[in-house]
Image: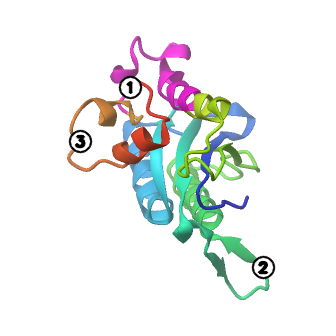
Amino acid sequence: MHFHSGNIYHVYNRGNNKQLIFYSERNYFFFLDKIKKYIHPHCTILAYCLMPTHFHLLIYAEEKSERSVSSNSIITKNVISEGIRLLLSSYAKAINKQEVRTGNLFQQKTKAKAIIPDNLIAGNLKESACDYGSDCFKYIHENPVKAGIVMQPEDWIFSSFNEYNSESSIPLCDRKLAKKLGVLHL
């Protein structure tokens, strides 16, 4: 995955064989801490939802997102791609230890769909792209309702829905940017 500045991406993955990835409430909070550590420093988070078997992120790539990192190999990776890799591998390692299991926790390929072109800020936005961004924002927050886990999006504490409806002491999402980009939909 390569992330280009000025684009919004819907990033998602699920448990291998559609298995659980969150076994307890503390697992959700641990995963959010990993997002703060590995993803948040490299892009702006617009929305998220953690479900028992999968997760969704809506992120905005900035100039700092296009930096590359390299290790001892010749291959360089985009910092967001590397952050996602570290997020998933470190979380999987912890869950495997917790659940006394081995093997892949997540599906092999995390999906990242670019949903709004980089000319958004310049004001040359095609309406369909904005609609999709808004629809994606709504889809992410309605996921627990459609899955039958809760009756209302605000009842699911493992999504950013409530960050947009109240003053969170430590918000993960950038509400002002979400509104400016036209994806805010509540």
Callout 1 amino acid: Trp
The way the protein has been coloured in the rendering is: rainbow
Q: Of tags 1 and 2, which is closer to the observer?
A: 2
Prevailing secondary structure class for the magenta stretch in the rendered image: helix
Q: Position of residue 77 (x, y in %)?
A: 70, 72
Judge the density around disc 2: few (<14), some (14-19), many (≥20) Cα neighbours within 10 Å: few
Residue 113 visible at all: yes
Residue 168 point in image, percent of width and height? 23, 42
The image position of residue 171, as x and y in percent, is 30, 47
Q: Can you tell which mark lies on residue 156?
A: 1
Name the amino acid type tagged 2.
Answer: Ile
Q: Is residue 81 above or below residue 114?
A: below
Residue wearing tag 2: 75
**Residue 186 image point, x, y percent:** 40, 23
Visible residue check, residue 21: no
Magenta segment: 134-157
What residue is at 55 percent from the left and 45 percent from the top?
123
Task: Please give the label number shown on residue 168.
Answer: 3
Dot 3 alpha-carbon crowd within 10 angstroms: few under 14, some 14 to 19, many 20 or more: few
- The amino acid sitting under disc 3 is Ser
Which residue is rendered at x = 62% and y = 69% of the image? 66
Q: CA distance from mark 1 to mark 2?
A: 40 Å
